Image (cartoon, rainbow, N blue to C red):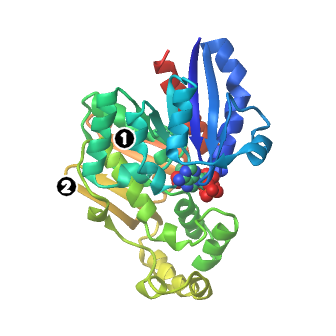
Amino acid sequence: MTTVNLAIFGIGNVGSILIDQVQDIKQRLLDEQGLDLRIPVITNSALAYFTDDTNKNWQTDFKKSSVNYDILDVIKYFKSQQLKNAIAVDVTASKTLVDNYELLIEKGFHIISANKIANTLSQDYYNRLRRALKEKGKRYLYETNVGAGLPIVETVKNLYQSGENVTKIRGVFSGSLSYIFNTFSEAEKPFNDILNTALLDGLTEPDPRDDLSGKDVARKLLILARELGIKHELNEIKVASLVPEELGGETTLEQFKERSYELNSIFENKKKSQSPDTVLRYIGELDDLNKTLEVRLTSVPKSSPLGQLKGTDNLFEIYSESYDKQPLVIQGAGAGKSVTARGVLSDIIKLAQSLK
Ligand SMILES: NC(=O)c1ccc[n+]([C@@H]2O[C@H](COP(=O)([O-])OP(=O)(O)OC[C@H]3O[C@@H](n4cnc5c(N)ncnc54)[C@H](OP(=O)(O)O)[C@@H]3O)[C@@H](O)[C@H]2O)c1
């Protein structure tokens, strides 16, 4: 039997479900794979709960018994309890925690992360982190950084590592923008009506301009590019933001919401000016031949896989030597707390199996 000890940082949407999912499959993992997955530490930004293993009542235990902490307390606890096979699981969106990755690796932790920050800082940091992992013989898995639970990072990495020449990756990388343009292309509705529905349904960030700016798509594109050994910085990606200048910058969220009708004519004109049988999609595109990374709104044939996209699905087309005319296509829910937690858990099990 192999015991694996998780320190779970972040108990928000994804972290909470992840802890529940671990409880649900605990016995099966033990019976079928001889893996004892334990969670001796769970934290939010200020408080940590230390135990020998969490159980199904972890929320109550956390409320009752959590204490103020810093990262050194977690490290010391693992050391004092002699907890082997330590994995730090980052289900936060915190830069502070990322700043501690190198320390965690130094102190013997593997890292699993849903947090995109570490992979989108400078190329220097990216290389340094990988050097630290190599030196310490530790692993870092982050499948959910792109496409939530979809197996996109692993697929791109496998193609690259097996010597396949990936020439292009193109797709819809954002669930909220997928929903907005899939709906806008089908329905005769003003753009801001669709945007408001997406906001009310929790599909966009609280400030929808965070989605419309294209920055999140750019981050995901950079993560995939770096898997292919392409050295690039976030600010070198060409991003066509969907937020007009007059609605960005100084404009408050309230003002943006009030004036969001100003977006209607912009997108209606784009819709009308494209050729028939095409639809608008907001895509990320990596072109290895031309060495470009680009995020932009484009028209695609209605009959193409991208043109057929529905709901909030993500879709990734990967072109390579072997997938030359017809791309390898990965499609499905690219966001959502349950699928993301499942993706993190899948990384945890993969790593745990390698520790046996
Ligand atoms: N939701 C999705 O569909 C999805 C999909 C793919 C990837 N992701 C990524 O998954 C991560 C988590 O998303 P979420 O929706 O679960 O976020 P969330 O609901 O906002 O939860 C974030 C959690 O992280 C905690 N936290 C913040 N800073 C921390 C720190 N320095 N140390 C320890 N804990 C800290 C927060 O604690 P406080 O309450 O104390 O602030 C909170 O418990 C994000 O990076 C997100 O981009 C999410």
Residue 168 shows up from this direction: no
Q: Give x and y (percent) for residue 212.
A: 49, 70
Residue 142 shows in the view: yes
Q: Which quadrant of the figure contains the N terminus?
A: top right
Considering only vertical position in the picture, is 97 above or below 251? above
Q: Which residue is mark 1?
A: 326
Q: Are marks 2 and 1 in contact (CB under 8 Å)?
A: no
Q: Position of residue 99 (x, y in %)?
A: 41, 51
225 relative to 130, above or below: below
Q: Is residue 5 above or below residue 293?
A: above
**Front in this rendered view, residue 114 or 169:** 114
Tell me which residue sits at (37%, 42%) in the image. 102
Label 2 element class:
loop
Give me the C-alpha separation between circle 2 and circle 1.
20 Å
Q: In the drawing, what numbered circle is on residue 77?
A: none
Residue 221: x percent and y percent?
Answer: 37, 53
How many numbered dots are placed on residues in this image?
2
**Mark 2 Cβ and ligand 1 under 8 Å apart:** no
The residue that appears at 44% across and 77% down in the rendered structure is 270
Residue 342 placement (x, y as % from top left)? 61, 37
Q: Residue at x 42, y 53 (%)?
A: 117
**Secondary element at image label 1:** loop
Label 1 is placed on what type of residue? Answer: Gln
Judged from this view, the residue extending furthest toward the left is 290
Nearer to us in this view, 158 or 114? 114
Residue 150 lies left or right of residue 32; in this view the side is left
Is 309 placed left or right of 222 in the picture?
right
Callout 2 amino acid: Asn
Write down the residue under mark 2.
Answer: 290
Please rate how many residues cluster around mark 2, counting C-alpha atoms within 10 Å: few if below 14, some from 14 to 19, many from 20: few
Q: Of the residues under marks 2 and 1, which one precedes in the sequence?
A: 2
